[in-house]
Image (tube, grey):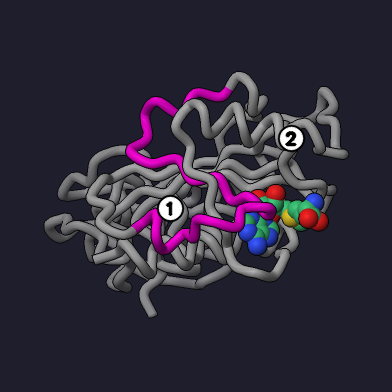
Amino acid sequence: MMHRFFLREPIANTVTLHGDDVKHIGRVLRLAPGDPIIICDGNGSECKAIIRSIGKDSVECECNTPVPCESEPSVSVTLYQGLPKTGKMETIVQKCVELGVYSVVPMLTQYCVVQPKESFSGRIERWQRVAEEAAKQSRRGIIPQILPLVRLESASFLDYDLVLLAYENERATTLKQTLTGFLGKRIAMLIGPEGGFSEEEVNRLTERGAKSVSLGKRILRTETAGMAMLAQILYEVEK
Ligand code: SAM
């Protein structure tokens, strides 16, 4: 298996890796000049590369022509996750990155029991590290971004072709029905916290065009619902 490293810039003929990647390559993986690795530009392209030299603070690589990363879904799905009790978000981020999520937005809703403190940015950074590790392990072409915390009542969903509200009390409409014939590119999926969504939230969201959908007759935990819904969406729409 070729190890994968992410740049945050376009891939040139020769690429220099810095920071933690240098230590990882030299001391953890014990790679050497001549060894092959995969380099991703973080924007869905990747290339095979050969390590040319390993220095104290940098690793020089020679790159082949970048190609689209075939592990990226044809549809981008953003998870708006009702802030769950402490300790669950790491699992949600890790599993949804493996399953193909495009980005994750922690979301404050009426029934969230967790109220973020000033140290919240540290939690975002930790979730971003979980996302990067999961992207490498699952051979993603991007590192899904963990976006800043939003309040549901002030979130804008105008950029999406479809906004799916997973509502535990929805009886009429299934996810499958809503996805039938979908040809767009950008989906937002909203998952409530342990206490679910309030009627008021559901009414306000559906008035603004969100589609309330059922994920089936069983009530899933908040940490299960996002990954289950994401898997079902990509099963249905991914080419
Ligand atoms: N308070 C709710 C109850 O006990 O009836 C449970 C909320 S559930 C733990 C958390 C979130 O997962 C829900 O707000 C919803 O977004 C999603 N969810 C769980 N089961 C679902 C289902 N069968 N259909 C649609 N959404 C579901």
Q: Quadrant of the C terminus?
A: bottom left
Q: Counting other residues with Cα less than 10 Å from the Cα at mark 2, is it few (<14), some (14-19), or many (20 or more)?
A: few
Residue 146 is at least partly visible in this image: yes
Residue shown at 64% from the left, 28% from the top: 152
Q: Amino acid at mark 2?
A: Gly
Q: Quadrant of the N terminus?
A: bottom left
Mark 2 vs 1: CB contact within 8 A: no
Give x and y (percent) for residue 183.
23, 50
- Say which of 169 and 105 sits in front: 169
> Is residue 78 placed above or below 204 in the rendered structure?
below
Residues in magenta, as a range: 155-179
Q: Which residue is mark 2?
A: 122
Give x and y (percent) for residue 16.
33, 46
Q: Position of 24 compared to 235: left or right?
A: right
- Say which of 43 and 199 sits in front: 199
Give x and y (percent) for residue 100.
43, 60
Give x and y (percent) for residue 161.
33, 38
Q: Is residue 177 magenta?
A: yes
Q: Quadrant of ligand 1?
A: bottom right
Q: Amino acid at mark 1?
A: Gly
| Element class at badge 1 | loop
Q: Which residue is mark 1?
A: 55
Q: Position of 64 compared to 76: left or right?
A: left
